[in-house]
Image (spheres, helix red, strand yellow):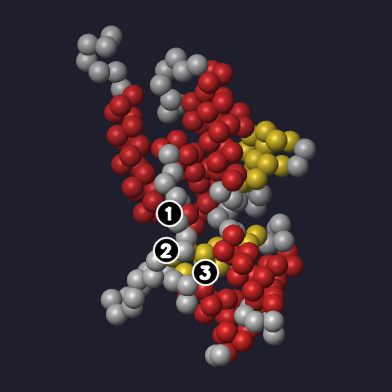
Amino acid sequence: MDDLEMQTSSSNPQLSVVVIALCKGIIDRETDHSLWQSLLTLQQPVREYVKTLGLEMILDEAEGYAFLRTREVTADEVQLPRLIARRQLSFHVSLLLALLREKIAESDASGGELRVIVSRDEILEMIRVFMPEGSNEVRLIDQVDSYINQVVKMGFARHLKGSEKMLELHRIIKSFVDAQWLAEFDQRLEEYRKQLMPKSGDA
């Protein structure tokens, strides 16, 4: 048994606790401060352990979150089966993530609060301009609630306690929605806009 295997055994159960938590999703400083401190203390053995699983840990100490993603292998490494499945997002969930990413950027640029909070009504208005004119209002609200619930389930936002219509955005969106992601999404957005434009003869 090598050093790493020994650390993940009963000699260091906290390492197992941290790795299992990462395999389940995001470790967030605000929601579990004790686990966050364990992660900071054990980050090197955690990185080494998840590497054996074909993963890498993304850790942002300033923003207070960590998560796992599939590690890119080099030419002389064996490609392991994916442990973390790819998530195929619908266009509208992708659109919502892009809009929320923009909301965080605007808040940062204005020097506002670290916490970025938006209401369901704000989100509704942001998405409305991308929906076909004359959309059924009740149906639109149901759709937006569905998109919001998916974003919350993925860990990109959370409902404020006592106010289900207010959302606090998680800064992990900045890692997920990077420049390449936005560039690819812009292409899809342009195609979508063309679909919404009235075709000649429609008038």
Cα–Cα gap, marks 3 and 2: 15 Å
- Secondary structure under tag 3 reads strand
Residue type highlighted by circle 1 = Arg
Mark nearest the camera among 3 and 2 is 2
Mark 1 and mark 2: span between their CA atoms? 9 Å
Residue 82 shows which numbered tag? 2
Which residue ends up furthest to the right in the rendered image?
162
- Locate residue 183, reporting x and y percent: 34, 48
Location of mark 3 (residue): 57
Of callouts 3 and 2, the N-terminal one? 3
At horizontal 72% and vertical 61% (from top left) the residue drawn is 32
Q: State the residue position of label 1.
A: 86
x and y percent of residue 19 in the render?
60, 70
Amino acid under label 2? Arg
Q: Amino acid at mark 3?
A: Met
Residue 19 is marked as: none
Whether residue 101 is visible here, answered yes or no, is yes
**Crowd class of label 2 (few under 14; some 14 to 19; many from 20; radius 10 Å):** few
Q: Is residue 6 left or right of residue 98?
A: right
